[in-house]
């Protein structure tokens, strides 16, 4: 059975994001997948990249460089336990699903902190092993999120610009950089402004997509895909 | 004298980011500006958007919706003190400078949390007051950051794509949405891989730019500027 890690960032289990997460757990489990959830708010996950992430002595205690210190700590097994736990989950997963409400054209800070702290050099990338040869190659990622703005606002000529523009840093800049292949995003536009019935349709559509997810081809992570 | 708020996110005062922040404080103070710094790591600024941001009762305790609760709390003066403090600083400022190392094609989580929590509806925007009529209009913002990757990697045909692509969510999606006009970003490419002399030149160049900053025109926040 395939392994899936859902990194989930919503404060409220009753939210649409909470329901989307639940639907994914149910549908993927039904398929025989083994599903793990990192419920970031429930875990009170720490988003700040600080000296606390390094157990024991620093490589250079004169001038703190987070990237270098995390890299060195990774190599000697000296990262904090919460990071080691998350890295184990990532290592075992065939697919990473990120489930969140869009905050300011990006992921909520608590999820950005997961990226900042978990995907350290040595574990997820190590020059020249980045992009197509990133250390997490052979894994898939999927960004599943809700928006405040409508589909029209995020259309090509819309005031917020094509939604693909804002996917670039997350999909290319983070996942592709680590070698992870990216499946098309799953976007629920403006669920707060539609009927309860429409929201139920959103859940059904997600469950439907998941049924044939493993047959999907990754998107092409080139600027042409995002900005054409 | 003009008022400047520097929102600063680096763990190490001796870093280039620390020096760039210091140079800005010195140069702008010399010009007679009043400069305030929010040193996010030193403040242990909270990046997570949670129920703790709301003092007293919730608007809807059945189902927690952060955006709605923060909006309602703002209106009745019920946001947590750290947020009220930051909002005061923003309100008074003519110019916001964001100083940080680029983490994953974006700002570090601690700064994303500042955006998520400080720029609440009612304070920074309130439909239809967004984009050109956002509530923080008549203010300027400038993103000043360092990168890990080189200028060549962030060139138009480079592997990381034109650096402008990753500015879109920050400049258009956040600042322009709140009505803030955006000055051209100030980018120090790959300071860790250049000589000490080159790093000193970077500081001098920043001080030089600041001397005539108030004469600069904002960039055009349209897709053409970013993706042409």
Image (spheres, coloured by chain):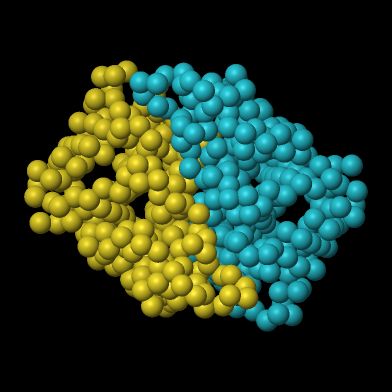
Chain colours: A cyan, B yellow
Q: Residue at x 50, y 54 (%)?
A: B48
Residue A72, located in which quarter of the rendered image? top right
Q: Residue at x 80, y 48 (%)?
A: A35
Give left or right: position of A54 versus A186.
left
Q: Quadrant of the N terminus of chain B?
A: bottom left
Q: Is residue A92 visible?
A: yes
Give left or right: position of B44 versus A97.
left
Viewer-closest of B115 and B155: B115
Image spot of residue B202 (x, y percent):
26, 30
When the figure is inspected, residue B131 is found, relative to residue A7, above or below; the finding is below
Viewer-closest of B147 and A120: A120
Image spot of residue B40 (x, y percent):
36, 46
Residue A162, located in which quarter of the rendered image? bottom right
Q: Residue at x 73, y 59 (%)?
A: A21
Give left or right: position of B152 versus B3.
right
Residue A185, located in which quarter of the rendered image? bottom right
**Image mark count:** 0
Q: Residue at x 70, y 37 (%)?
A: A90
Viewer-closest of A183 and B27: B27
Image spot of residue B87 (x, y percent):
32, 63
Image spot of residue B185 (x, y percent):
33, 45
């Amino acid at each position: 059975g395939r392994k899936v890690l859902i990194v989930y960032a919503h404060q409220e289990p009753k939210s649409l994001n909470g329901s989307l997460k639940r639907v994914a757990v149910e549908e993927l489990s039904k398929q025989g997948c083994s599903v793990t959830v990192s419920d970031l708010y429930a875990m009170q996950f720490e988003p700040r990249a600080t000296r606390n992430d390094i157990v024991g002595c620093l490589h250079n205690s004169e001038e703190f460089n987070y990237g270098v210190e995390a890299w060195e700590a990774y190599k000697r097994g000296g990262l904090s336990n919460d990071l080691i736990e998350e890295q184990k989950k990532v290592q075992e997963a065939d697919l990473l699903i990120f489930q969140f409400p869009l905050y300011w054209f990006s992921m909520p800070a608590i999820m950005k902190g997961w990226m900042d702290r978990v995907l350290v050099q040595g574990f997820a990338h190590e020059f020249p092993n980045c992009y197509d040869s990133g250390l997490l190659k052979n894994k898939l990622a999927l960004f599943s999120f809700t928006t405040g703005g409508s589909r029209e606002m995020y259309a090509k000529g819309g005031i917020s610009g094509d939604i693909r523009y804002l996917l670039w840093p997350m999909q290319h800049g983070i996942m592709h950089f680590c070698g992870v292949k990216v499946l098309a995003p799953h976007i629920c536009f403006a669920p707060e402004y539609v009927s309860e019935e429409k929201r139920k349709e959103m859940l059904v559509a997600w469950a439907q997509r998941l049924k044939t997810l493993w047959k999907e081809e990754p998107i092409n992570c080139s600027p042409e895909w995002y900005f054409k």
